[in-house]
């Protein structure tokens, strides 16, 4: 009886991927351990007066002055008169200020000018209240904002 | 036991974490509770940021919260040095002001004035978009 065996079965090349799986687990554990769920911080932008070039060939529209007192009350100053707008510091949306800024911006755009806002802020007002006003400006896309006490 | 679905899950989770992780370039000191501004913009370019933290009690510290600025000259020196460093790297220097929402504005104004003196005229106020962080 022939004991000739069938041709030796070809051994297919194999790939041992157990190390790869170990590395994958390690990477996964690393990312799980190091990741944290944090709220993302965002920006409210402002450019200081020196960076905004003044165009001499264009008569600028009268700037709007916003005043913020130590209690967080928002005023608009126009023609020497100080008019209180949002008197509740808890109201973050500053609706009356937003309304006035919208009208001012529309008038500026209709006149072919850029709206310019000056802010006169009491040093004792809370940071959050200042950001409420800056947020209203950012919402309307008014980016030419200056703080009056930075200009000498 | 067929391990292939488990390996597929591992790859999926790995890809999820790789894709969702962000390189945080701007350091955030959690002791500063930044204000909330619903219409704030996403941070686009974190390069060139000169971070100054303003704490609730008016203390001013640098990005790592190690150095406290006792007077305006120290603050101006720090901002000026950082400005030069950023300019050497080719980034436009920007003041990244992380003011605590309960601090009074005069402390932040000090920082903005110092930045103006040090010839940094772009200011970014750090804010959250919602107040979820503050609802416990």
Image (cartoon, helix red, strand yellow):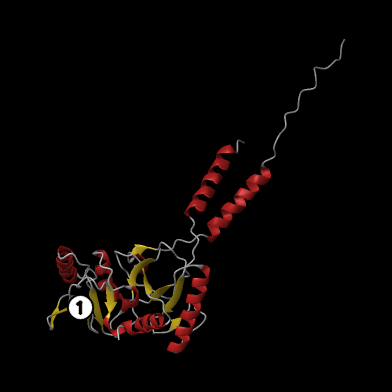
Where is residue A51? Give x, y as percent: 35, 74
Q: Nearer the viewer, residue A63 or A66?
A: A63
Place residue B98 in its image quadrant. bottom left
Instruction: Answer above or below: position of A35 versus B116.
Output: above
Q: Is residue B59 above or below residue B130?
A: below
In the picture, the quarter occupied by the C terminus of chain A is bottom left
In the current view of this chain or complex, which residue is farthest to the top?
A1
The image position of residue A60, as x and y in percent, is 20, 73
Residue at x-position 25% and y-position 69%: A137
Q: Is residue B136 visible?
A: no
x and y percent of residue A39 in the render? Answer: 40, 63
Label 1 Cα crowd, 10 Å radius (few <14 / some 14-19 / many 20+): many
Pick out the residue farthest to the front. A57
Q: Nearer the viewer, residue A15 or B126?
A: B126
Quarter containing the N terminus of chain A: top right
- Above-or-below relation of A29 to A74: above
Q: Residue placed at 20% from the left, 67% from the top?
A: A113
Asked whether residue A45 is in view, the answer is yes
Nearer to us in this view, A62 or B34: A62
Horizontally, residue A23 falls left or right of residue B42, namely right
Subunit ID for the residue under disc 1: A
Image-quadrant location for residue A134: bottom left
Residue appearing at x 49%, y 64% in the figure: B24
Q: From the viewer's perspective, is A74 left or right of A44? A: left
The picture places residue B25, in percent across and down from the top left corner, at 49, 66
Residue, disc 1: A65
Question: For residue B52, which quarter of the picture?
Answer: bottom left
Mark 1 residue element? strand
């Amino acid at each position: 009886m022939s004991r000739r065996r069938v041709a030796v079965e070809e051994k297919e090349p194999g790939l041992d991927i157990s190390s790869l799986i170990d590395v994958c687990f390690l990477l996964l554990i690393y990312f799980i351990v190091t990741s944290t769920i944090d709220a993302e911080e965002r920006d409210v932008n402002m450019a200081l007066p020196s960076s905004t070039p003044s165009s001499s060939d264009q008569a600028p529209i009268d700037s709007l002055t916003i005043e913020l007192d130590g209690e967080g009350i928002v005023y608009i100053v126009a023609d020497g008169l100080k008019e209180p707008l949002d008197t509740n510091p808890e109201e973050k949306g500053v609706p009356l200020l937003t309304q006035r800024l919208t009208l001012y911006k529309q008038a500026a755009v209709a006149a072919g000018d850029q709206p310019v806002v000056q802010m006169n802020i009491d040093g004792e007002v809370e940071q959050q209240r200042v950001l409420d006003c800056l947020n209203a400006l950012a919402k309307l896309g008014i980016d030419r904002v200056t703080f009056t006490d930075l200009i000498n | 036991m067929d391990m292939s679905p488990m390996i597929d899950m591992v790859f999926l989770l790995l890809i999820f974490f790789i894709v969702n992780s962000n390189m945080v370039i701007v350091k955030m000191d959690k002791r500063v509770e930044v204000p909330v501004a619903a219409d704030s913009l996403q941070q686009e370019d974190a390069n060139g940021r000169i971070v100054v933290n303003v704490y609730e009690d008016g203390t001013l510290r640098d990005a790592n919260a190690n150095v406290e600025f006792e007077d305006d000259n120290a603050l101006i020196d720090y901002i000026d040095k950082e400005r030069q460093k950023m300019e050497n790297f080719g980034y436009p220097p920007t003041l990244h002001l992380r003011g605590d929402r309960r601090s009074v504005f005069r402390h932040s104004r000090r920082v903005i004035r110092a930045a103006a003196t040090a010839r940094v005229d772009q200011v970014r106020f750090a804010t959250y978009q919602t107040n979820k962080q503050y609802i416990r």
